[in-house]
Amino acid sequence: MRVVNFQYFLTRKKFLVILLFINVIGTIYGYYWYGYQLAETPPIFLPFVPDSPTASFFFVFVLIAFLFKKNWPLFEALAIMTLFKYGIWAVVMNILTLIVSGYLPWQGYMLIASHLGMAVQGLLYSPYYRIEGKHLVIAAIWTLHNEIIDYVFFMYPRYGALDQFIPQIGYFTFWLSIVSIWITYYFGMKKQRKTMVF
């Protein structure tokens, strides 16, 4: 009974509007947070640098579609894959920063909470996705290509305290991408799908 009530709550139009507002604000702030790095980034790499805000940007389109009782499966695949990947990645990087430096500013704790929320929200709405194989493939190519941009062309997000561990972080991030692709397949492509009903 609790699960039913929880799903009912998730699909209320007012809640979707609130969640949309939160993701729009979070996306804007995320691009602002990347501002200093974007200013130094060659134009060709600009779409691939602000990882987390781009993930929430994808989810904004998923929520807009839901509000119109529609599905945009490519955005759904991109959203769940990147929300999980970069949500978990940011949580791990901030915890590692705390371990290595012995200190994490309040913004770091805010990032842990917000990025954990990112990872979770993509999963919570997965029963309503309509992802097909072609959408999974496109999202996987985007995600793995982003990996190359980050760790071959060194466009990864800057965490000064962790600079000495970049090879290890790149290795971890690659396998996190693989897990994120599997998560998208497992949760986003089940045969039994729910319909968004207000």
Image (tube, grey):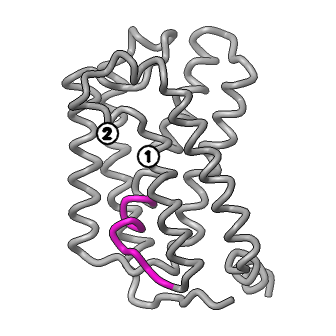
* 22 relative position to 80: left or right: right
Contact between marks 1 and 2 (CB within 8 A): the answer is yes
4 relative to 176 in the view: left or right = right
Q: Is residue 13 above or below residue 100?
A: below
Q: Quadrant of residue 3?
A: bottom right
- Residue 148 coordinates in the image, percent (x, y): 21, 34
In the rendered structure, which segment of residues is drawn in magenta?
70-79
Estimate the x, y position of residue 11 in percent, counting from the top left: 68, 80
Going by the image, does 138 lie left or right of 94? left
Q: Check the image and report above or below for 196 versus 161.
A: below
Question: On the picture, is 148 further left or further right than 109?
Answer: left
Looking at the rendered structure, the kind of residue marked 1 is Thr
Residue wearing tag 2: 47
Label 2 packing within 10 angstroms: few (<14), some (14-19), many (20+): few
Residue drawn where x is 49% and y is 17% of the image: 159
In the picture of the structure, the residue carrying the numbered disc 1 is 54
Which quadrant would residue 136 be assigned to in this image? Answer: bottom left
Look at the image and say whether residue 185 sits in the magenta stretch.
no
Give the quadrant of residue 43: top left
Q: Quick one: label 1 or label 2, which is nearer the N terminus? A: 2
* Residue at 50% in and 60% down: 59
As measured in the structure, the alpha-carbon distance from the residue carrying label 1 to the one carrying label 2 is 8 Å
